[in-house]
Every structure is written in C-alpha cells, then in structure tokens.
Image: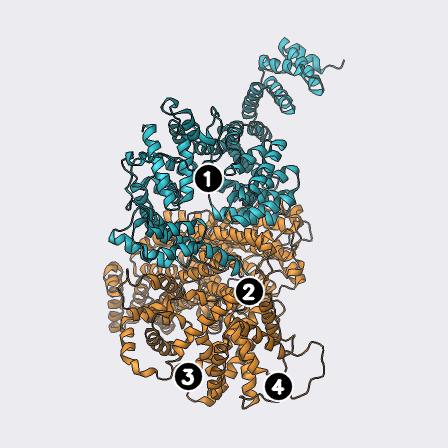
Amino acid sequence: MVSKDSCRNEIRAAIRQLTDRCLYSAAKWAGEQLVGIEQDPSNFTPANTRFQRGSSSIRRRFSTNESISTPLPSIGFSQAATPLPEEDEAIDGDFYLLAKSYFDCREYRRASHVLRDQVSKKSVFLRYYALYLAGEKRKEEEMIELEGPLGKSDAINRELVSLERDLSALRRTGAIDSFGLYLYGVVLKEKGNESLARASLVESVNSYPWNWSAWSELQSLCTSIEILNSLNLNNHWMKEFFLGNAYQELRMHTESLAKYEYLQGIFSFSNYIQAQTAKAQYSLREFDQVEIMFEELLRNDPYRVEDMDLYSNVLYAKEACAALSYLAHKVFSTDKYRPESCCIIGNYYSLKGQHEKAVMYFRRALKLNKKYLSAWTLMGHEYVEMKNTPAAIDAYRRAVDINPCDYRAWYGLGQAYEMMGMPFYALHYFRKSIFFLPNDSRLWIAMAKCYQTEQLYMLEEAIKCYKRAVNCTDTEGIALNQLAKLHQKLGRNEEAAFYFEKDLERMDAEGLEGPNMFEALVFLATHFKTHKKFEEAEVYCTRLLDYSGPEKEKAKSLLRGIRMAQTGFPSMDLEHFPI
Amino acid sequence: MAGLTRTAGAFAVTPHKISVCILLQIYAPSAQMSLPFPFSSVAQHNRLGLYLLSLTKSCDDIYEPKLEKLINQLREVGEEMDAWLTDHLTNRFSSLASPDDLLNFFNDMRGILGSLDSGVVQDDQIILDPNSNLGMFVRRCILAFNLLSFEGVCHLFSSIEDYCKEAHSSFAQFGAPNNNLESLIQYDQMDMENYAMDKPTEEIEFQKTASGIVPFHLHTPDSLMKATEGLLHNRKETSRTSKKDTEATPVARASSSTLEESLVDESLFLRTNLQIQGFLMEQADAIEIHGSSSSFSSSSIESFLDQLQKLAPELHRVHFLRYLNKLHSDDYFAALDNLLRYFDYSAGTEGFDLVPPSTGCSMYGRYEIGLLCLGMMHFRFGHPNLALEVLTEAVRVSQQLSNDTCLAYTLAAMSNLLSEMGIASTSGVLGSSYSPVTSTASSLSVQQRVYILLKESLRRADSLKLRRLVASNHLAMAKFELMHVQRPLLSFGPKASMRHKTCPVSVCKEIRLGAHLISDFSSESSTMTIDGSLSSAWLKDLQKPWGPPVISPDSGSRKSSTFFQLCDHLVSIPGSVSQLIGASYLLRATSWELYGSAPMARMNTLVYATLFGDSSSSSDAELAYLKLIQHLALYKGYKDAFAALKVAEEKFLTVSKSKVLLLKLQLLHERALHCGNLKLAQRICNELGGLASTAMGVDMELKVEASLREARTLLAAKQYSQAANVAHSLFCTCHKFNLQIEKASVLLLLAEIHKKSGNAVLGLPYALASISFCQSFNLDLLKASATLTLAELWLGLGSNHTKRALDLLHGAFPMILGHGGLELRARAYIFEANCYLSDPSSSVSTDSDTVLDSLRQASDELQALEYHELAAEASYLMAMVYDKLGRLDEREEAASLFKKHIIALENPQDVEQNMA
C-alpha cells in the first residue's frame, strides 16, 4: 500500500497543475481526495490539520471550515513528488496569465486567441482546451437555435476538426503532453473514434494519473468488461479509483465495493468514496445502510448536491416524507438549477401524490441534461401513475436508448405493457431486464405474474420463474407462497406441501402471521391427514388452534377426523352411521 | 414525451424554399397582365406552375435539392427562357445582401397572394389562390419566417450564402465545359465515379472527415477529393448530366481557392415532414419488392436511415423502415429490436395509414398494430407458435380497444398463419381468447378455424371498406377452397349434407372477387403518396430527354412522350394493388396446375410474368419463373429447363428464402432418378432435407417434398419395404398437418411401390384411395395418373384383366394426352402397348400399327427426358413386336437401342460426366 504522505504530496502538486490548466473539476475531485486522507495529527499543528481536514472530515473531530476546495500546499512538496512531470517554465508568461483570467471569466475564445503564439506546453494545452470549450458552448447554443421540426438538427462542435488536426500533428511530432493527450482523447471520442480515443486516454493516464477527468472519460468508453480488461494501465492508486468506478458502471457491485474498501484505508475521510460506496449499496438494495451513509455525508458536507438524487430515491422507497421534504428544500436553496435538485423535487412531489408536478420537475431535469437517465425512468413511473401509458413507454424507451443496460426502464416497459393487457408483449421486456439483473427476485416475480395472467395462463413457465425468484432470496416472500399455490392448482400436492412448509418456515423466522399462514397450515394439515401422516397433521392442526375464526373450527374438525382415523377402522365405519 | 407534444409537419424556411418562392414570384407576379413577361405561351407558363407544384410535393429524397440541381431542372422546364429564369434566380439571391433584405423579400411575397375573401378578380390577373397548394406553401413560408428568432434569421442568411456559393462555383464554369477533357479521362480511369454513385452516403462521412484530414492522413491529390465531392452533389442525376457537372465542379473548386472549407452537410436541409414520410413509404415499398436482392443493398438503406435519424431524431418511422430492412435481410434480433422501438416511441400512431386517424384512440396508442407486426415477423422468421401467441394477444387487445380494422387484419394474418404453417392442434391457443368462436372453438379442427377466421376477417373488412384486405381475403379464401373440402361446421343430424368435394366454381368466384380490387382501390390509398410519387415521377421525366438520344430523337416527340408518361402516371395503380392482382393470377395458375390443365396454368403464369413482373415482390416473381421452368421440365425435357433455370438463378438467387435452389435440386433429383444415378439422387435428397428448418411445423412443403423424394429414390433402388416405410410415415405426417393434396400423391406412391414390388393386390386399395382423394379435390391430372397406375396394377394381376386395364386406360387417355407431362404420356403409351401384347385375344400382326405408333411416341418423348429405364422398355417392346412381325432389320435396330439405354442405365456416371 502506498504511504499516505506520498499520496498527499502527489495530490497537492496535481491540484496546482490541474488548476493551472483550468481542469477545474479534476482539481476539485483531487482536492476532495486530499482532505479525505487521514492525517497523523502529531505531524501537524492543530491549525494546519484543521485546515487540511476541512469540511469533509467525517467525524468532525475538528471544527469545520467551509471555505476550501483547493488547499494551498507548501511549495516544497511539489518537488518531493517523484513521478510528477516538471513544469516547463518556472515563471508563467504574461499572456498565459491573461488567458487564464479570461478563461476564468468564461471568455474562452478570447483566452485561446491570446495564446495563439505561445509555445509552452501549458499555454498550448490551455489554448486548445479553451477552443474546445468555446466550440462546446456554441454547440449547445446552436442545438437550441437550430432545432428542427423533428427534433434536434445535428449541431456539432465546429472546432473539433481543427482540434483533431492540430492535436494529431502535435502527437506525431511528440510535442504533446499528457493533458494534450487527454484533450485529444476527448476530441476523438466526440468524433466517434472510440478505439483511438481509448488509446490516447490510456496514454494520458499512464503518464499523468492524477487527472480524474481523463479517467472518467476512459470509464465512459469502457462499455464492457472485455474492453476494461484489455486496457494496458500502469499500476497506480488512481487506477483503483478508476476500477471502482468502472466496476460500478458495469454493475459489478461487489467488486466495486471491495475496491472502495481498499481505498478507504488511505482516504478514510473521502466523501467521494463514501458516496460511491453508498451508490453500490443502493444497487444491492441495502437501503437502511445507504440512508445512514447519506445522512452522515450530508452532515459533513451539507451543501452537497451530487448523488443526492440517489438519497432521495432511498427516502422515497422508505416513504420518509419528512426527510425527503427537508432534503428537497435544502437542495432547492443550494442550487435549484441542477438536474439532481429537480429530480429530488420530482421525487418529493411523487411521494406526495402530485404526479403532474413531479413530471414537470423531471422534465426540467431533462431540459438541463437530456441524457439524465434516472429522470427518464422516474418520469416513466410518474406517467404510469397518471395512467398515461404511451407517454410512460416513450419515457422508458428513451432511458433504454440512452443506456441499454438500464434494467429499471426495461422493467418499466414490461409493466406498462402488462398494464395495457399485453402480457405476451411485455414478457420480452421483462426478459431484457432480467438479462441485466439476473439476481433480483422482484424481476422474476414480475415475469412469473405475467405468465400467470389469465390471458396467457402458462403456469409451468410461471413456476420456473418463481423458482428462480426463490433462489435469489426473495425478501417479500411472494414466490414461495405462489409456488405452493400453483402446485396445488396443478394437483401436485407433494410439491405444494414442500413449498408450503418452506413458506411456513420463512414466516416463522420472520415472525409473520396472516392469511398466508392459515392457508399453509390448513393445506398442510389436510395434506398430511390424507397421506396418513397423523403426527405431522396434528402438529399443524394444533398450531391452527391458536388462532380464532373459521380456521379454528376447521382445525377442530380435522383433529376429530385424525383421532377417529387413529383409533382404527371401526371408528371409520362409525362415521357412516347416521347419528 | 417530445414525440407526443410536437406538432407534426412543422415547417422551416430553408434556402431551397426561398428559391421556390422566387420562382413563384415569377410565376404569379402581382402585376396585371394575362401572361407575365418572360413567358411566350400559356403552356410554358403552366409548365412552370406544374414544376413548382411538384417541387413542393415530390418525395424522391430526404434532402432538399441544391441550387445546382434546381438550375439544371429549370433549364429543362424553361426551355427557351431558361437563361432568363436562372439569371433571375441567382440575381435575386445575390440581391439578398443582409437579413433585412430577407424581411423585405417576404413582405413582397405577401403581394402575390390574393386576398382570402375577394371574389372579384379580373380575368387577366394572375393571383395565387391562398387556399391552393402553392398559395398554402407561400403562406407557410411567410409564417415560418415571421416566427423565426433573430438567431434563426442569421442562420438562414448564412445558409443562403452557402447555398449560393456552392452553386456559383460550379455554375460559373458551365458555359465552357469541354476544355478539361484530360482531367475527365483521368477520373474515369480511377473509376471514382462508380464508387461515389454506389455509396453516396458513405461518401458524405468520408467527405466530412476528409475536409479536415486530407493534408495529414490521406495523400490523395486535392483535386481528386473535390471530384468526389462534386459527384456527391449530383448523385441523383442522370449519368450524363452528372458527368458534365463533375467535370466542371472540380475545376471550379480548385480555382476558387479554399474558401470551400465550410462543412458541406450544413447545406443539406431536410424536406418537409410530409415529403419525407412519402419518401419513406416509397422506400418501404421498394424494400418489399426487392427484398434483399443484389440490386438493392440493405446497407445503403441503412446508412441513409442513420443519416435521417441523426437529423430528425423524432421521426420514428425511421425505426420502422429499419425493421423492414432487417426483416428482409433476415436479421432477427435487429428486426425485433427496431420493431419494438418503433412502437415504443410512436405508440403506433405515426405514419400508419392503415387506420384513419379519426377512429384512433389517442390516449391508449395503437399498440395492437405492434402486436400484429410482431406476429407477422415471427411468422416470417418461422416461429409459428410464438406468432400464434402474439396474434392471439393482438386479437384480444384490438377487441378491447375496439380497433376493428386491426382486428380484421389480425384475423387475416392468423388464418394465413394457420393455413401456411403446419400446426397440429390449436386447442388452448384460440379457444380461450377469441370470443366469437369460443363456443364452438374447442371442437374445431385447424381448417375449420382457418375458415371461420377468414370469414370473420372478410366480413369486417367488407364493412370497414378495406378494399385491399377484402381482395387478399378473397384470394386466401380461394386458396382455402382449393385445398379443402367444404364441410358444414355442425356435421351431424340427418340433414347435414356431406358433399365431399372441393368446389372449383367457388374457387373461381373468390379469385374473381379478389380481382375486383382493380376497379375500386382508390378509396383507401392515401392521396399523399400518390401525389408525391406523381410529382417525383414528373420531375424525373424532366431529365429523361437529357438522357441517351435513342429514346427521344427529336424535341417534338419529346414533348409528347412526357405528356403520355404523365398520363401514364396519372392512372397508375398503387404497387400494393397491382401486387394483389398479380397474386390472383398466380393463384389461378396454381389452381389450374392442381386441377390439371397445363395450358391454362402456363397461360396464367405468363400473364403474371409479363404484366406484373416488375411491380410484384421478388418472391412472387420468382414463383412465377419457377412455375414456368417446372412446366418446361415436364413438357419439354431437362435441357430447356436447365437453360431457363440458369436465367432465373441469376435473377433470384440473392432473394432471401430463394426457392431457386429448391427447384434446381428437384430437377437434378428427377434427372438422376431417370438416369439411374441413385447415389446422386440420394445425395440430392439429403440436401433437400437439409434445406428445411428443424422447427416443428415450419417448411412443411419442403419437408414433405424431401421425404416423398426419398421414398422415390428408395423405390428406384428396389428397397421396397424401406420405401413403403418412408411413405407410410409421410402419410401420417400429412394426415397430422392436414395436407390433403399431398395425401393423394403419397397414396399413389404407395400404390406404385406395391406395384413395383409385385404385390399388385396390396397396391389396389392404395390406388383406389388415391383416386377417390383426387376426385374429391378435383385433381384431374393426378387422378388420370392414378388411374394409369390402377390399370397397371390390374394388368399385374394377370393377363385376364387386360380388358379392364385397357378400359381404364382409355378412360384416362384424353386427360393424359391433353395435359400430362412427357413421362406420364410415355408411360401410358408403353402400358397400352403392353396391354395389347399381353392380350391373348388380339394378335399383334393384325393391329401392329397402333402398338408400334404408341411405342414410337413413347420412345421419342423419353429421349427428351433421358429416362433410360422406360426407354429401354419401349425399345424392348418394339423389338418384340418387330420380331413377331418378322421385320428383322427394324428388330435389330430396336434391340441396339435397347442395349444402348441399358448400358447408359448401368453406367450413370458417364452420362453425368457428359452432362457436366
């Protein structure tokens, strides 16, 4: 394991370099990790420590200090970090300084113009980066301006062509640094040249691993585990972060959790890792745990909006209306024009039962980010609630087309079609969703129900699905009961008894009671009685006697029958005599 | 979401529309004169009007034409005044110097519209009626312009600049095109032209990247790049014009320095929604007609669909087209995916003209149509059970949503499925869901279900006035009547009439009813596509006289030819209608084939091939060809048939699910049997079996054919018991899947097997059963053949039955000689001779001529078939007769012939080699 100190020093230098190149989100990410490293208090003065821990320390051993996102490390440390590339100029050029301030004021084109004759690598990168961003900005504007009658016209970033030309020329002459490679990778990706983009990004992260933006771009290009494994990456602790994230996106949640656990050894106070862990746990449906984690996260970082939509989903699932309302109001006051905020508010309204308003907020989220996957899916749910199935189907389908692995949207599609009385059509969608998440009992149960509908009535298939659901640890306990009933319906009493017994065990273990229990007991008692297993039958009958109602009477009569049967044949004959 | 809220057919101002507006200004200037300035005749004026009308309606591409193309067309429309027209157009464009000028321009446009209510218009004033097509167009343009935001006007202005610039650079050089012959030759040699023409859309991609990368990656000469670019612009034009332009463009480009850096695809504007829909519909028809034949590459469609989807993501019909394309290139997963996507997005409400929009229920969408399509897709891919499930669901959902149209179509699809696929029993599939027949459904056989479904579908289609469905239902009904004995549904009680016969009259009636479509199809077809295709045809005609001079030698005939062509289009029948009518002819041919009239079958097939050959789907056309080839093989021998087959192979082998291979194998098998090459026959048999799908109930026809041929091969190899076994199991299969007609031929085969094995007594019942089957299905030719076998069996019982055998034979003779194939006729002749020879009462010497005549006939016909076994028999008999008559020379001749055939029979490989 790498030492915490070396990590710290590397990150400090990296933040400076990233900020110099205006790669702000990467710098932000690095900063978060920097204060996430647990420090040995003895090495530092308390003031320094406090400064370092900053707002994101979890246990709040130190008083919080909100103001930092980029700490100022002492200058000496940047030399100590061995693999860091040296800056190519000791003093920044005047033009660079001007350009950077233009950039900071978001005047990208101006910034790139100022740097037109600069040759230092930093300036060159900034020039191209500013140009790229200027093109992106214009693209966004044009997308709205040029929107045709049938949807968007193909607005493109007009700088891409010249950028690709210049960067590839630089690359061939070897005059490109890792940041340039990152930008080149981004440009290639936008132009649709994925494999070349991957190669460029891999080269970039291998020579300069601290640029999280490059890693994220690389992750977005790893659409399958095969691609991920084929990447030739140097070992570095940043790679672990990358792998954790990539595994999560590939739905390998346990592997991802293992990575984060390992990283927590160094970055024990990192909010990022905590949020990622929470995400993974959410996918594993450990809602209670996730809720606790998010509460803690919010306590440490109260103005955080990222990932909070997930928290709202958890609160929604747990129907914690008050907490959701609190969260919604909080993010609203922090930054209302974030897709996450809109999504949280949408969830809030949905929980309140005001589906039209919820749809409005989901729509707003989508206006802010057209590819915001969960908003499409959630909007689909809202439309389902509003009984507007075509709109729901449309919304779900958009989610699926953005990310074909989104099992929730496939599931939603299936449900919508089932609602419309097209179970056979729906089956295809359920199958799709199960393909992406084969270990979820809910999906199997949904599919089984589909088979069970009176239109299809394919009970054998339903049984198969329920069996799979049982194997996936069905938490709601529907599958066992249904299996038993189906077998009973098909006249396979042995199997029915087997599943009723299992269901009974489960209910006993969870301390549940209810009509299912009676049903199971009555069936088992009669079943064992007819098979002359009187002892077992008696056990079930006596259990039934504990309850009141018609079951009790039934149990009594059963017991009477058993007694008579046990005493021998004469009593059997007696039954036939009229009294 | 977006798809549901967006207004369909929204309209955007584009440079091309401005050109049309400018031309409209010329067409209808607000000034008051009977004939505006540049026109010399009213006809000319009208011609421009027609041209403008078709410009706004034609649907031959997704993009609006470029200025260059427009100018080319104008040149043809304008005739003498073309120079004036183009000059005016370009001048008008160059006068648009600032966005303000655009504003003024559209203000002026208002002037050419008449006021909405004024009825008082002077006779000689030309004013556009605001409610006419062109008037509406102008109004929409003005409205769309007024709605534009400031940025929108700026974008429009800059795109106008691009639009003019491109045309200018090429146009400037047009006057003196021929001084660059050298470069032209160079390009020709590199064959870039063909390349570019073949893959126009790929070229766009290529070009897009190329414009940036050329200096680095590709070391192609710059001018060459430009050449392909130029070609691209003209890709839709006739080869002649495009050549001219290509030649001009690169030069112009090269000279006009590098200001052509702006992205080319920027100036590609989509046409209006309606036009694109029309284009997509035409493409859909094209996919259906051509299938995946070589002339029609699915990848080119795919690439233009990609392009379209990128430009108009809310146009969901693209997904449907992609589904069709994938369906025809047999890509199951992609087809399924795209079908589902289409219905998810559009809820079945976009682009389907199957249901008039007024009856559609917007709230629920029309997902039942999705089910119907899915069902038909499964059917095509050979999943009958899945298809049945899906269609059942479709029936249920359309009943639930009371979509009667869809229900009618679904029922028709279902009956089609049931009759095509071998489904042993449908209990549980149909019984639970389809209420009109629920009460009786459980006890019904498959055919009865088919009948009910058809009737039901026909009734609904009739009441909904769905002419095409009615017609195709009539055809399906005819097919059903052809194959099945009509039996009353409730067949018990004293009054149940049991007429165990098919009814050719009702078949004929149904076919004729189906063909009625041709007189009243117009009510259903959508006017949009007709208008659109008419307009695009008109525009294409513009260019025809520009083509090779052979077609139009002088300008006089050119005018008239355009006129007639236009008339031709005006009365043109939609493709789907002529396809149906064509299908009725094919069905006629099939029914005559079954009923045993070779000339009638041949005639109907020929009618089909000549009249409907190009408008029909390729599978139907293939079927017609195959029928003709089969006819040739039966009546003319193999040489002709194989020659014809070669032609058909070239034409149809690339069609998916091609039956050409099947026919080839059949012919080869037949010939191998005749030549006695049993090993080859066996191998072909196995190959034939391998063609069929392994799924139950799919490809039944093929499977039956394969095992029938297997039995025949075994019979030829004298493995009688095995042959009988195969035939028996085949009979069981036929019985299970209700293949009645096949049953008759299997029975005949069994009789044949017993005859050959020398068990004439055992053979008799089979022959009789076969005859009775033939009788009830009116299979006259097969019956004649069965009668012949029966006669042969009688003769096999001993010479005392000769009289009876001869009587039977003579009864069947008219049919055999009139309609039978070569083999059957030869067999009959030989058998007749055999009868005479074995008849103790008649002596050869008295009646030698009749015997010799028939034998000679037989051996002639067998020569064409290369049927050595029978030919040997004929020569043997001839030799015997000559021997009896004492004509020794002729006897020797016949004997040597006999020897030759026997040798050929014993060494089939030699013959094979000769043939190869």
Discs 1, 3: same chain = no
Badge 3 or badge 2: first in the primary sequence: 2
Badge 4 or badge 3: first in the primary sequence: 4
Quadrant location, the C terminus of chain B: bottom left
Q: Which chain is orange?
A: B
Please name which of the two marks, 3 or 2, marks the residue nearer to the observer. 2
Q: Is residue A57 above or below residue A154?
A: above
- Find the distance from the CA under tag 4 to the CA under tag 1: 70 Å
Q: Residue furthest top?
A: A567
Q: Nearer the viewer, residue B344 or A207?
A: A207
Q: Position of residue B499 (x, y in %)?
A: 61, 57
Chain A palette colour: cyan
Q: Position of residue B661 (x, y in %)?
A: 37, 60
Neighbor class of circle 4 (other Cα within 10 Å; few <14, some 14-19, many 20+) is few
Neighbor class of circle 3 (other Cα within 10 Å; few <14, some 14-19, many 20+) is few
Question: Which residue carries the number 1 mark?
Answer: A436
Q: Amino acid at mark 4?
A: Ala
Discs 4, 1: same chain = no
- Find the distance from the CA under tag 1 to the CA under tag 3: 62 Å
Q: Amino acid at mark 3?
A: Ile
Quadrant in the rendering for residue B49: bottom right
Question: Which residue carries the number 3 mark?
Answer: B551
The residue under the point 32% across, 42% down is A205
Please name which of the two marks, 4 or 1, marks the residue nearer to the observer. 4
Q: Which mark is residue B150?
A: 2
Please name which of the two marks, 1 or 2, marks the residue nearer to the observer. 2
Question: Which residue carries the number 4 mark?
Answer: B31
Q: Position of residue B376 (x, y in %)?
A: 52, 54
Q: Nearer the viewer, residue A189 or B834?
A: A189
Chain bearing mark 3: B
- Which structural element holds mark 3? loop
